[in-house]
Amino acid sequence: MRLAVLGAGAVGSSVAELAADYGHTVTAYADSQSAAVDPDGVDVAGAIDRKATDGIVGDADPGEAVAGDYDVLVEATPTTLGDAQPGFGHVEAALERDRHVVLANKGPVAERYADVRQLERASEGSVLFEATVGGAMPVLSTIADFDPEHIDAVRGVLNGTANFILSRMSAEGLGYEHVLAEAQDLGVAEADPTFDVDGTDAALKGVIVANVLADDGEEYTLDDADVEGIEDIEGSALELAAEDGRTVRLIAEVADGEVRVGPRLVPENAPLAPTGTRNIVQLETEHAGRLNISGRGAGGPETASAVLADVGRLPEL
Amino acid sequence: MSDSTDEVRSYTLRLELVDEPGELLRALEPIASNGGNLLSIFHERGNVTPRGHIPVEVDLEATPERFEAIVDAVRDAGINVIQAGAERYSETLTVVISGHLIDSDLSDTLSRIQESTNATVTDLSLSAPEGTEDASSARIRLATEQGAADGVMETVRDLAAEKELRVIEPLAAGGDL
């Protein structure tokens, strides 16, 4: 497949770097300001070097990447809320040209799911978005395999930063601010960790799962989720939980048509209480009981591997 | 469910005790001596009734036959039995609440949870590392009827919102995940 990779952050650059390993050719690579376009294959290493030294990936305009030759448009620009632009516009442009789309950007499927599906129906191309939920973990493809109709509930730890903070606070008896600063030093939390600690990131993933479970039914957006974060959680609350053999984790839960995200009491040794940045998703299946999927929920090569798995699932156009 | 009279069930007794030494022991003794298995005792020491009595809630397990004998024996001992619960507390849920628990009247919070639901507080742990004027946390275990856990959680959430407390809910209300 020929790939146009939009977004030159951790995920986009990893997709571009790993594409050849999976037998694909990158025919366009773009960030928000610039693009490298070559129907015979972009020099990915050169473009990544140029981004580091000159701040641009090539001399072309990002619009040329969207309009260029490719089979699959990989949307890995930063997630935006509301109208989900410019990601949504890229999805629209590719589908209108009957190209496939693979999303790492959560915005279009969390905020405008019905619009994306409508565009997809009118197109020869398909849209896949495994990378938007749980990074490397095969969550959406497992739901698709089981058939959303046979999944009763989905719950999980879907934000590694929040999980790191809660598990460190629990294990070391340290305060929230202290552990957050430590997480930032380690590069586990970003300089602005707002979306991770206020539950927004986990909620977007929950909303995407809810959309998939309700396919062709109700549409969910972030506004439909009941979201509570972990900011300023009391150390004494974690202590009391520990005394009772429990701990606290930021859990996203999709059940009975509702999306809820918040700190929850879970048994200390339960699958839903992973430590560090590890993520886990638990599917409540109709005929097969509980199914746990755990792994790395973020990171460039991890998320890129989910993007490339999606590319591999797409039919030839 | 079987209707066998041999089946052990959970019951709740609501009692009112006179505020005198030894009263609680006097109330509990007939339960043990009639074959009841005590599960928990909630002694609302700070919550005196208009008659000056102290409400006590006792959860116990017994066969239906033995439970009747227990209630009779408690009454015979001169203890005021307010309610001999036929309701069956079969689900427990644990929540942690944090915030200005003392300033927002923890005792009132607990009584209101019990009054507006049919749940009963079976365990309470308080942690106030910075003293009672600062933020503190409490872990509360509630026993409730089968299927009533969602409603109880709803009440706890509303109360917490009213008193600006933070609730950390169990994963699935009533579920033991």
Image: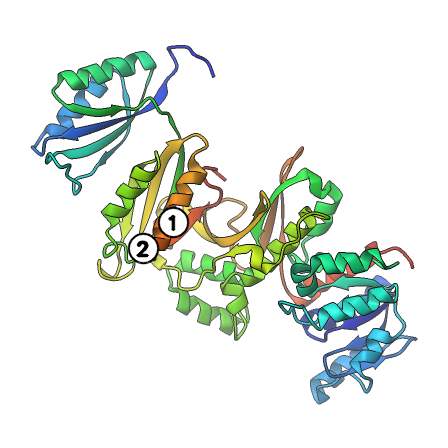
Q: Report if residue B39 is visible in the image.
A: yes
Residue shown at 63% from the left, 54% from the top:
A220
Q: Position of residue A203 (x, y in %)?
A: 57, 58
Question: Which of A242 and A109 lies nearest the eye of the viewer?
Answer: A109
Q: Is residue A283 above or below residue A39?
A: above
The residue labelled by disc 2 is: B163
Q: Measure the alpha-carbon separation of dots 2 and 1.
A: 9 Å
Number of marks present in the image shown: 2
Determine whether the residue tagged by mark 1 lies in a helix, strand or loop: helix
- Residue A33 in percent (x, y) is at 73, 83
Q: Earlier in the sequence, mark 2 or mark 1?
A: 1
Residue type pointed to by label 2 = Lys
How has the structure been colored for display?
A: rainbow
Residue placed most toward the observer, B54 or A292:
B54
Q: Position of residue B14 (x, y in %)?
A: 23, 28
Q: Chain of mark 1?
A: B
Left of A254 or right of it: where is B126? left
Residue neighbourhood size for the residue with mark 2, other residues' Cα within 10 Å, grouped as few (<14), some (14–19), many (≥20)? some
Q: Amino acid at mark 1?
A: Asp
* Residue B158 - label: 1
